[in-house]
Structures are given as C-alpha cells and as structure tokens.
Amino acid sequence: MASEVYFWNLRTSFKKSYEVKLKNLINATGFLDKIEKKDIVGIKMHFGEKGTTSFISPIWLHPIISLLKQKEAKVFLADTNTLYVGERVDAVSHILNATRHGFDPAILGAPVIIADGLKSTNEITINFNGNHFKEFYFARDLFEVDALINLSHFKGHELAGFGGAIKNIGMGCATRRGKMQEHCGLGPKPIRKKCVGCGRCIEACEAGALYLDEENKICVDDDKCVGCANCLVACKNGALEVNWKIDVKLFLERLAEYCTAFISSLKKPILHINFVIDVSPVCDCVGFSDASICPDIGVLASYDPVALDQACLDLVNQAIAINVGQYKNEPKPGEDKFKAIHPKTQGEYCLEYAEKLGLGSRKYELKKI
Ligand code: SF4
Ligand code: SF4
C-alpha cells in the first residue's frame, strides 16, 4: 500500500510566506492532533559540524516550534554525540557548536539537549530481534519524549549514498557504542606513531581490551573489545581511530535495522520531515559542504520514513544536475545522483532492506501542499 508523503515545493507569495507554507505542511499531516498540553516533544536534528553551511538553518524551526507551543508542548532540539572526534564529540563542544550555528534557546524558545549525555553514556539498551543485532544502544533521553519530530537534511553521504529520515534515526539516535556497532565489527585501529603510552585509554576501557606492548605503544584485543568507543574520546593524541572499513551493504542493513528497532520500540508519535534544500554532495558531519548538486526541491513530511526517503531520492534524481564538476560520472535524468558522486555507494539498497524489515513502504502518494 502506498504511504502518504506531503510535499511543499518551496513556492511562496506575499500572502503565503514560508512560515504559512511550512505550517500548512505540518497541519496537513495531523501530527498536532497527537500532541497534548505539557507533552515533551523532541526535534531530532543535526546542527552541522564546524565548517559546514548546508545544515538546516534555525530560521526553518520557528514555524514548527510555534505550532507545537500553540499546543502548549515543551519543545527541545536534540542530537547525539559523534563517533569521530570533532566539534560534536561531547555535549560541551556540541552545544557550543550548535549555538555558533544559531540554535540558541534565547532565539528559538527551545533548548538544545544532547540526548546521550556529556560523553555518550546516557544510554538505553533496546532488545529487538534484528538480523544483525539483538541489542541496540540509543540515547536515553530520546526514549523519554511524548512525541518526536525527525527533522533531516536530505543530502549526499560518502558511505550511505544519501542521508535522510532513516539515517537521522538509525545513526543519529544511537549512542557512540551503537554507532560503532553499525560502522564496524572490530575494535579501534591504533596509530602507533601517535601513541605516547600515557594509558588514558586503558583506564577508560572497562572491557580490558587495551594494553601497551614492549615499545609502550597501544594494542587492541579485538576479542575483548565491545565497541563502546570510550577509548576514542579518552585519547587526546588521535592515536586510536574508528575502523571505518565495512562492506557497504552490511552497513546499510545495520542502519535500517537500527532505525527499525528505534521506531518500533519508542511507541510514540513520530513525524518525519526532510528538507531537500542545499543538497550537498557530502554529509553535514564533514567540515565543509560544497555547492548543491541539484536545485532546491522542497520540504516533505510523512509518518513513513521509507516512503519519505524514497520520494526525496526520486525527486533529486528527476531534477537537473548542477555543479556537474562534482560528479564522477555526470548522471542522466532519473539516474542516481548520489551514486554518480560516490560510485561505491548503494543508497537505494537501504530502502529495499528497510521495506523488507517492515519499516515502511517504497510506494508513496505525493500530496502537494
Ligand atoms: S592510544 Fe592515546 S590514550 Fe592510549 S596510551 Fe596511546 S596516547 Fe595514551
Ligand atoms: S572500543 Fe571500548 S571496549 Fe573496545 S577498546 Fe575501546 S574502550 Fe575498550
């Protein structure tokens, strides 16, 4: 059965500004009918790594927050700490980074909460019978909400092909341990020349998987490592890195499975909204954005994250290609633009697999606002 996907194509006028149109889009979904007075509503988003400019601008949040406040809901903006070491690696630098990018509670009326805590240990373990995992690790605070808006910037991604609704939950709601589980099955990779033998990582490793060899350089026992990623943050010298190498299809299956585990366990209303604007070739986690690969398309919303991502992918692929210097192979109309930029990716496979898991339907009905 086809799922409904609501679509605003960004057209505005004097009488119908962006605020009116965005509110119309959300009203059309009926999401506000599910919100009660004093409900705590999280808006899961990505505040953009330092150096990127293509993340969803705070200006778009005003109409959304305003609608929720009319229902007397308590609203907060949420993200989780990253696996890689950057400006979003702990809650302190993450909140400062979000503030620098304009996500200021004094302006928006909604605070930023890093939902997995200071160092990603504010975690809840979810039991779910997946094909790859039986235990899933998510940010605990996201399981305390009464309702959730999954607000994603639809753009390219070097490993997933594209990032949208599924990725914003599957990866974006996982703790560092969960992210590590999705990205690799191995312990961290030691960079011997950077290790000074200080032992900080050994203290941080509760599994006893790290030791110093006779040259005072760090070694990892993969059999003992549980993939919590604590050591990556403990090391101040960059001597431990994530083993990023993973089969692309396996990664996409894990991503879809994580998203399915989250949604089926939360059991609260979730509205997925994708902004298909500033469609940058790489993820907002990278410290640059580069020019868009197609014209701005619009904002889409649905209760079905599979249908939503499929609709966004189709609209991007049907659009003209711009800034064609970024493409390894310039795509013809209808061809996968993200694959033309990152040839090894197979983004559509994530949607196929998610549909098989029962997360949603790839068939959709586009309802224009
Ligand atoms: S890996 Fe980093 S934290 Fe661990 S001993 Fe080496 S320098 Fe110290
Ligand atoms: S990822 Fe966790 S368990 Fe593995 S070596 Fe690092 S701290 Fe230890």
Image (cartoon, grey):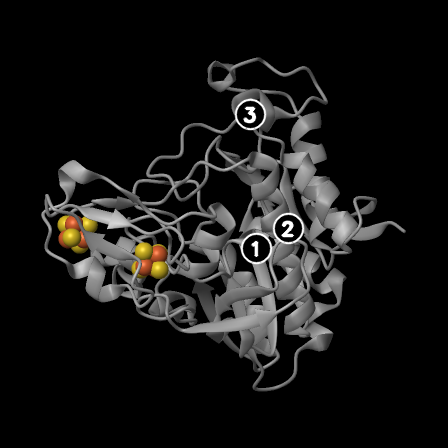
Residue 59, position as x, y percentages in the image = 46, 54
Q: Which mark is residue 344?
A: 3
The answer, for residue 12, to whether it is visible in the render is no
Q: In this view, does 339 lie above or below 328?
A: below
In the picture of the structure, the residue carrying the numbered disc 2 is 256
Secondary structure of the residue carrying numbered label 2? helix
Can you tell which quarter of the image residue 22 is in?
Answer: bottom right
Q: Residue at x 86, y 49 (%)?
A: 2
Instruction: Report the number of discs.
Output: 3
Amino acid on which the number 1 mark rests in the picture: Gly
Residue 253, position as x, y percentages in the image = 63, 46
| Label 1 beta carbon within 8 A of ligand 2 | no
Q: Residue at x 72, y 22 (%)?
A: 334
Q: Which residue lies furthest to the bottom in this view?
A: 38
Amino acid on which the number 3 mark rests in the picture: Lys
Amino acid on which the number 2 mark rests in the picture: Ala
In the picture of the structure, the residue carrying the numbered disc 1 is 170
